[in-house]
Amino acid sequence: MEEHGIQNIGFVSLGCPKNLVDSEQMLATLIDAGYDIVPKHEDADAIIINTCGFLEASKDESVEVINEAVALKEHGKVQRVVAAGCLVQRHRARMLEWCPGIDAMIGVFDRDHIVDAMQETPKKERQPQWIEANALLAARARNLGDAKGYFEDDSNRLQLTPRHWAYLRISEGCNQNCSFCTIPSIRGKMRSKPVEAIVEEAKKLLTSGVFELNLIGQDTTSFGVDIGYDKGLVGLLNELNDAVTQSGGGWIRLMYAYPTYFTDEMIEAMARLPHVLPYIDIPLQHASDAMLTAMRRNVSAEQQSLLLDRLRSTIPGVGIRTTMITGFPGETQEDHEALLAFIRQHQFEAMGVFQYSKEKGTVAGTMEEDDSLRVPCNIKQAREEELMLTQQKIAFDRAAKAAEESERHDVLIDSYLGETGDSSLHLYECRTKQQAPDVDACTILMSEEIQTIGSVIPCTITDSDGYDMIARPTSELEKVVSLPLR
């Protein structure tokens, strides 16, 4: 199909919050260059898919979405399909085999070339690619020499999250060597963003109306180590807390912490700083020493248990979220039972479970090829169900207890859901300090008054519905009815 100039762009963002920030940055770059973003792909001149390639299922989803866009190109006005992100970075040699209709590809270190990908392509170069192999080569290509740390600029973003909360990337890549993980081969080594850049980005977000900053990276615990920032995560939390104080208030939520080297100083800073929430997302992956060793997690089950105990004893009311892997090569029933016991012992506020997925190029992927180590799919499924049912009971009981004890929480109002059947109450989806956006349960607020999205109000838990809590504004429950004197 002959190109007549690209103006309207459709965009699909797949995968994790780090990928979402990449998408936000690319969208802002496109808008600054004069392009329009359209919600319907049928109205687009070009479609960009920012892919995920972390797991085999992620790859399949990305390939499917790309090929759907290619089909629109073959039958409609879409002129160009661009694939970007992790799948491109990981499988650049296979992309045109899986998706032969791609017009351009952009890797994770080259998203500043997104406007170039919209330009007309010379016939001699039908599939241009901007895919540097690593951050060091990308820095050199931009005349930055051997740049240390995260040199890209995230400050110019088209925010895709609700106005009142945003992700704030503090680092990229990972220096851990987990045997199941593809992240280092895709995103590279750990690269911390300069503290000054993070604080300025935070101030910009706060000024725009953001109340909640969700700190993300592949390993937020190790922040600053690679750039020689001795104050590390504690120093960053102090700086961000000051910035939020100056802005008039807000929430800072720590995500993607790594259990190894999570220090007492970090725990104490979380407890001490008023704007840092009593919440931590800390993927543990397992609780059997045999499995933790095979996964190359560099931590023991006892060390993890002691860390959780210190978090609970030091940070009042802390909410702990984690993820676990079941069916890892060599996992025995004894390992599974140890994980179940660990979950029952530590009573996580939230937990996700993933069945192990074989990923080529990883140590665990090679282990999975050994028949004696491979866990059958039906056993993986059964173990996942048992783990999740165990966590479900913990979560359901916790929500019910909160209602029984009429717990009081400040809740952040995320969205309006409508009215009750008799139109007497307005319904809102909200979150407490112990509930992160998108991944955790929520709190349903029932209010006589119309509330403002993005505001925080004191509430009392009155009921529960499975994982979710139901609340009323405390002020409405405390209304005093004056009776006339006779």
Image (cartoon, grey):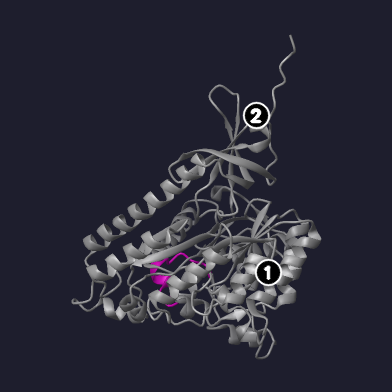
Quadrant position of residue 434 = bottom right
The residue pinned by badge 2 equals 448
Cβ–Cβ under 8 Å for marks 2 and 1: no
Q: Foreground residue, 442 or 374? A: 442
* Horizontal side of residue 479 vs 418, given as left or right: right
The percent coordinates of residue 53 (x first, y second) are 44, 69
443 drawn magenta: no
The residue under the point 75% across, 12% down is: 485
Is residue 335 shown above or below 252? below
SS assignment at label 1: loop
The residue under the point 30% across, 68% down is: 338
Question: Magenta segment, principal secondary structure?
Answer: loop
SS assignment at label 2: loop
Quadrant position of residue 465 = top left
In the picture, which quadrant includes the C terminus? Answer: top right
Q: Closer to the observer: label 2 or label 1? A: 2
Q: Foreground residue, 339 or 420? A: 339
Q: What span is in magenta?
A: 91-104
Can residue 179 be seen? yes
Disc 1 residue type (three-letter): Asp
Q: Foreground residue, 343 or 158? A: 343
The percent coordinates of residue 470 (x first, y second) are 53, 39
